[in-house]
Image (cartoon, rainbow, N blue to C red):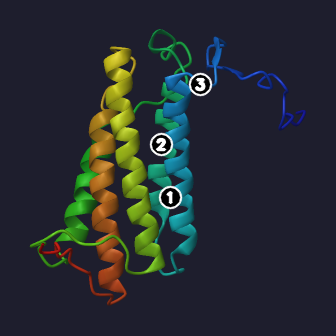
Amino acid sequence: MTKAAVYTRTGDLGITGLVGGTRIRKSDPRIHLYGEVDELNSSIGMGIAMLDKTWNVDYLHEIQSSLFDLGSNLACEKENRSKYNLPQIQEIFITKLEQQIDQYDKELAPLKTFILPGGSQEAAAFHVCRTVCRRVERQLVDFEEQHPGEVPELALRFMNRLSDYFFVLSRYINFKKNIKEINWIPKKS
């Protein structure tokens, strides 16, 4: 098998190809959207790299794979997705996210106020994942409004739950490291 070239020069003029071969501008909202999904995936990779070796990162890798699934669907027009047999986000994955959230959250103190993102480097990295995830969610909503039916089924629920997961994961990491959360205290005028 011949190794594919890293560069093709086909995008040098600001055009790129979708899965089905349709050529579109790199400024197209679809490209922005799956680029944001890729940024989230890379942010997760950074968070994983910061975790010490005692963490089982298999589930985080599952999340990354699901984000690749989502990105591949966004890079393909809806009518072509079944033709290319692209993997879809399944209800079971959202259920699994909820189970993970519940598992971590049961060990955490209840929140009585907002907390400042931060703590350990690892927790801070997953807070960044949370905010990037929320950005993807907002762009999914916007894209769906502009292109009805193009956002894969369950994508919005997946992203909404995923941002919740990163919030709880960040708190859980700080809890396991015995790092106290810092409450947000509004300044009095």
Q: In the figure, is residue 86 to the left or right of 141?
A: right
The secondary structure type at the circle numbered 1 is helix
Q: In the figure, is residue 27 to the left or right of 14?
A: left
Q: Which residue is mark 2?
A: 67
Amino acid type shown at disc 1: Ile
Q: Residues within 10 Å of mark 1 (few under 14, many from 20)?
A: many
User: Closer to the camera: disc 3 or disc 1?
Assistant: 3
Instruction: Tell me which residue sits at (52%, 21%) in the image.
Output: 85
Give the position of the N terminus as an image quadrant: top right
Q: In the figure, is residue 158 to the left or right of 47?
A: left
The secondary structure type at the circle numbered 2 is helix
- The answer to whether residue 180 shows anywhere in this view is yes
Instruction: Tell me which residue sits at (51%, 12%) in the image.
Output: 80
* Marks 2 and 1, how far apart at CA: 10 Å
Mark 3 vs mark 2: which is more N-terminal?
3
Q: Which residue is mark 3?
A: 27
Residues 21 and 60: in front is 21
Give the position of the C terminus as an image quadrant: bottom left
Instruction: Tell me which residue sits at (54%, 80%) in the image.
Output: 53
Q: Position of residue 89 (x, y in %)?
A: 38, 35
Mark 3 vs mark 1: which is more N-terminal?
3
Q: Which residue is mark 1?
A: 44
Q: Position of residue 92 (x, y in %)?
A: 29, 42
Instruction: Tell me which residue sits at (47%, 30%) in the image.
Output: 87
Amino acid type shown at disc 2: Leu
